[in-house]
Image: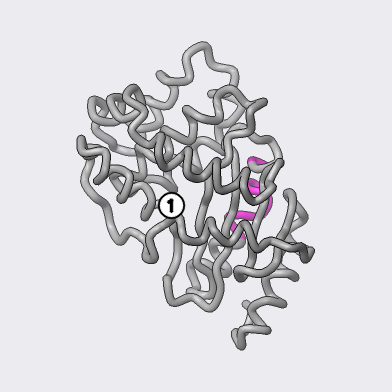
Amino acid sequence: MRAPIAGLLALLCVAAPSAVSGQDGDVVPSSRSVLLERADRARIRGDSAAPIRIVEVSDFECPFCAQFHHESFRAIDSLYVRTGLVQYLWISYPNPTHPRAWPAIEAAFCAGGVGRFWGMHALLFDRQEAWKEADDPFEVFMGYGGELGIDPESFGECMRQDWPAPLQLNDFQSAIGSGIESTPFFVVGDSVAVRGAIPLAEFRATLDSVLILRGATPP
């Protein structure tokens, strides 16, 4: 699906240009500036030299975002990201109708402070129904942090003090300024907009067409 998306391209400048390599240890940094820099890098997946980039604007509480994660993301990651064809960037957009989206995003970015953003990303989507209905999602997120081997004291402090808030606000304001009103929303190759959790075959067809235009061979 093609659409005017010039405003959305501002999102491409939010994150640092290269992904985190390896782990940053178990303790979430106590410096907010360090935490923000690491979390920003950690939400990028794949090779910075990849022919194209996918930007996903997403909400952990969104059922359609979870649908995309379950039905399409792992295949795209395996076939395109891990093979060096695509670099993937995740942008947060907490829908105002989803009261637990903000703290879930916060948990992911706090985990990103120790290079475990994608591990938390997987847990949040795989167990969406559990934490969405929990009496105390904070305790659930703390449990997820423990599963990922993150120091509980620093992880809890990161969430309680809202350390990732500037990154989350920047994402939200960029998305709103680009006219995004629903998730998931994707930009493929900095030029093609894809709205919603479309079937994997359709998503791949769009992805492959952009790769071919860039002179790359689809998988």
Q: Which of the 4 image quadrants contains residue 210? A: bottom right
**57 and 64: which one is in front?**
57
Q: Locate residue 158 relative to residue 80 in the image: left or right.
A: left
Return the residue at label 1. Answer: 43
Colouring mode (rainbow / by chain / secondary structure / one colour): one colour
Inspect the magenta stretch and tell me whether residue 67 lies in it.
yes
Residue at screen point 33% across, 58% down: 20
Residue at screen point 62% across, 77% down: 219
> Where residue 172 appears, x then y in whole percent?
55, 41
**7 and 100: which one is in front?**
7
Judged from the image, the secondary structure of the residue bearing numbered disc 1 is: loop
Residue 166 versus residue 80 in the image, above or below: above
Inspect the magenta stretch and tell me whether residue 217 lies in it.
no
Q: Which residues are magenta?
A: 66-75
Q: Which of the 4 image quadrants contains residue 55? A: bottom right
Residue type, numbered disc 1: Arg
Residue at screen point 36% across, 55% down: 41
Residue 7 versus residue 141 in the image, above or below: below
The N terminus: image quadrant: bottom right
Q: Locate residue 217 relative to residue 86 in the image: left or right.
A: right
**53 and 10: which one is in front?**
10
Q: Which of the 4 image quadrants contains residue 52? A: bottom right
Residue 8 versus residue 85 in the image, above or below: above
> Where residue 177 appears, x then y in whole percent?
62, 47
